[in-house]
Amino acid sequence: MEEIKICEAIRIRRQRKGISQDAMAFYLNISQAAYSKMENGETEIKIPRLYDIADILEISVFELLPKSKYGTGINIFGLKGALRKLRNFFTFKSRKRNTEPGE
């Protein structure tokens, strides 16, 4: 399945809300031509501008971003393993410190 680009996600969300490009440009304080270039992928969208667009569309900025290739959740099994390793590390350090001569 092909990823949706940020500019495409913006266009889709804008159309679903029934907001025109002219209105978006007005809210962003830019020309309609400049907004059109953003939505067509001809202009790079800076992060602060992306937040402004998300606010106008009344959505989270994360809804406009492509899905992470690493997933969106926490790998519980990996987390348990990491915590176990940390516990073992600190337990070993504590035992080693308690058994050192000269205390």
Image: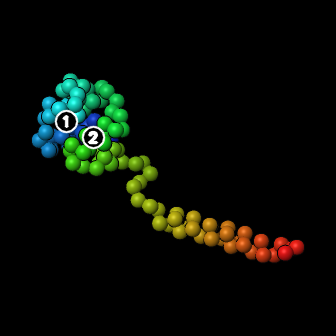
Amino acid under disc 1: Tyr
Q: Which mark is first along the chain, 2 or 1? A: 1
Left or right side of 57 for 87: right
Q: Residue at x 68, y 73 (%)?
A: 91
Can residue 1 be seen from the camera position used here? no
- Given residues 44 and 52, the one toward you in this image is 52
- 51 to 95, vertically: above or below: above
- 81 to 40, vertically: above or below: below
Can residue 76 be seen from the camera position used here? yes
The extreme top residue here reads 33
State the scheme by which the image is colored.
rainbow
Q: Residue at x 24, y 25 (%)?
A: 34
Left or right side of 94 for 49: left
Left or right side of 84 for 34: left
Amino acid under disc 2: Asp
Expressed as whole percent of the image width and height from the top left, the position of residue 35 reads: 23, 29
Expressed as whole percent of the image width and height from the top left, the position of residue 46 reads: 35, 34
- Give the quadrant of residue 28: top left
Q: Quadrant of the N terminus?
A: top left
**Residue carrying label 2:** 52
Expressed as whole percent of the image width and height from the top left, the position of residue 10 reads: 24, 39
User: Are dots 1 and 2 in contact, CB under 8 Å?
Assistant: yes
Say how many tags the image has: 2
The disc placed on residue 27 is 1
Q: Residue at x 81, y 75 (%)?
A: 99
Helix, strand or loop at mark 1:
helix
Left or right side of 87 for 64: left
Distance Cα–Cα, label 1 vs label 2: 9 Å
Q: Quadrant of the C terminus?
A: bottom right
